[in-house]
Image (cartoon, grey):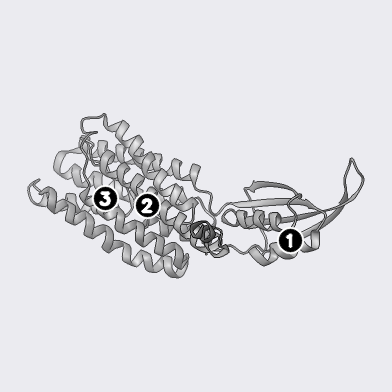
Amino acid sequence: MKKIKFLNNPKFKTVIGPEIFRIFIVVVSTIIYGIGLGWFIEASAVRMYAGGIPGIAQLIADIIKLSNHGELAEGTRSIIMFTTILGLNIPIFILGWFGVSKRFTIYSIISVSLQAIIIGYIKVDIFKGVEPSLLAIFGGALIGVGVGIAMKFGTSTGGFDIVSQYISLKKGRSVGRISTALNVVIAIVGGILYGIESGVTEAGLIFLYTLVTLFATMITIDKIHTTYNYIEFNIITDQPEELSAKIIEVVNRGVTIFDGRGGYTLQEKSMIYLIVMNFERHKVLEAVKAVDPDAFVVSKHVSTLKGNFFKRTIA
């Protein structure tokens, strides 16, 4: 009984429960990300890079390996991957803390710590020998699933996710495409690195497969991640004043009320119109449920928005 009473506590429903759920999402998305990189990308016979901070960690490990005549102990590579992923994320965490949101950054710190452990120390070789193009596609897609799920629920896998989230928030551009633009340089550097050692053909293959990986990641992220898209609401209600006040209270957005009549009953009705960011959608629906459960609600994505609209970070 005490457990049920605790679960029904309003504080648990509005604060503790969502936080537990987001931490769960952080763990799941990071595991998916780590599997995509560690089990697929790293297993390829042709070197390919995942992009982002882990991609840079791969590059650093490969530079050390090539400078040591192609020799690098697995334990040493794990240490390099682990320390580079953690170390290079520190300035990005600072950007996220001040430019995106503190809570978003805390989730990122949790994810990056787990990510560094998975990528650095949990190795599985079951996909070695698989065609590199398949590893690039499926590995890139899994990385995109991990990143996309994390962002969709207001969390992050860290690294360039935070940078692209910051740019997306300020400029309203595609998160996946921003990440890819930042990551292409890794593919170029990787190709040049191995081209010097193994020739033009090897460099071309590395560049090609890395691009396949990055584009698979980009497409998957854009299909899943909709955090900073806009949602239009049309709400037909008999309680426009009360509902408008509640919506303004929970999302702090302006609303417009239109007067009208029902076509069948000819009774007076009001329609509330507003636009919110995608992660605010559930707050509007909760407000409607609290004030007028019988209200008729229509919502849809908005592709273009201009004018006086304040873009918020995830709280």
Which residue is located at x 22 percent, y 34 percent? 126
The amino acid pointed to by label 1 is Val
Residue nearest the viewer, comparing 105 with 20 = 20
For disc 2, the marked residue is 27
Alpha carbon of mark 1 to alpha carbon of mark 2: how far? Answer: 37 Å
Q: Amino acid at mark 3?
A: Ile
Q: Where is residue 14 shown, x and y percent of the image?
A: 56, 61
Q: Is residue 79 above or below residue 50?
A: below
Name the kind of residue labelled 2 in the image. Answer: Val
The label on residue 1 is none
Residue at image coords 18%, 52%:
78
Residue 114's spot in the image, x, y percent?
A: 30, 55
- Helix, strand or loop status at disc 3: helix
Position of residue 185 in the picture relative to residue 280 (left or right): left
In the structure shown, which secondary structural element does the residue marked by tag 1 occupy? Answer: loop
Density class for disc 3 (Cα within 10 Å; few <14, some 14-19, many ≥20) is: many
Between 205 and 251, the one lying in front of the other is 251
User: In terms of sequence position, does the residue under pointer 3 or pointer 1 come before the other?
Assistant: 3
164 left or right, relative to 76: right
Crowding near the residue tagged with mark 1, few <14, some 14–19, many ≥20 C-alpha atoms within 10 Å: some
Query: x, y percentage for residue 196?
Result: 16, 44
Which mark is nearer the camera, 3 or 1?
Answer: 3
Which residue is under mark 3? 118
What separation in Å lies between label 2 and label 3 (alpha carbons)? 11 Å
Identify the residue position indicated by label 1 in the image: 255
Q: Is residue 236 visible?
A: yes
Question: Is residue 18 shown left or right of residue 71?
Answer: right
